[in-house]
Image (tube, rainbow, N blue to C red):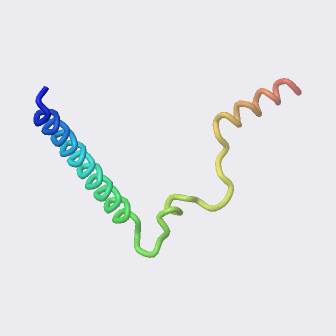
């Protein structure tokens, strides 16, 4: 192969990677903006949706407890 051809191919591949990287960066920025916009002002985004107090039991835990009660009784 001609050295100029391989160089051109490498440059095209580099440009393609840069375009993909730029597209991913723009997508992350848009997702971050949407995530920040959905949180009310003055509220910590890490704590949104957390309910204080006792939490409901997981299905796995409630099934295990049912088996233990059956064995005991």
How many dots with numbers? Answer: 0
Measuring 13% from the left and 38% from the top, which residue is drawn there?
8
Which one is nearer the viewer's eye here, 53 or 8? 8
Residue 66 occupies quadrant = top right
- The quarter of the image holding the N terminus is top left
Measuring 49% from the left and 68% from the top, which residue is drawn there?
44
Residue 69 occupies quadrant = top right
Measuring 77% from the left and 26% from the top, which residue is drawn there?
67
Residue 30 occupies quadrant = bottom left
- The quarter of the image holding the C terminus is top right
Provide residue 35's location: percent of width, then percent of height: 37, 59
Provide residue 37's location: percent of width, then percent of height: 34, 65
On screen, residue 44 above or below 10: below
Q: Is residue 17 left or right of residue 58?
A: left
> Farthest right residue?
72
Which one is nearer the viewer's eye here, 16 or 51? 16
Provide residue 50's location: percent of width, then percent of height: 56, 59
Which one is nearer the viewer's eye here, 2 or 47? 2
Which one is nearer the viewer's eye here, 25 or 43? 25
Provide residue 28's location: percent of width, then percent of height: 32, 54
Measuring 30% from the left and 59% from the top, which residue is drawn there?
29
Q: Is residue 72 left or right of residue 16?
A: right
Q: Is residue 33 left or right of residue 63?
A: left
């Amino acid at each position: 192969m001609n050295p100029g051809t391989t160089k051109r191919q490498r440059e095209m591949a580099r440009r393609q990677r840069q375009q993909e990287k730029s597209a991913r960066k723009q997508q992350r920025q848009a997702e971050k903006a949407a995530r920040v916009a959905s949180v009310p002002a003055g509220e910590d985004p890490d704590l949104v949706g957390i309910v204080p107090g006792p939490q409901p039991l997981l299905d796995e835990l409630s099934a295990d407890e049912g088996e233990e009660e059956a064995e005991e009784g």
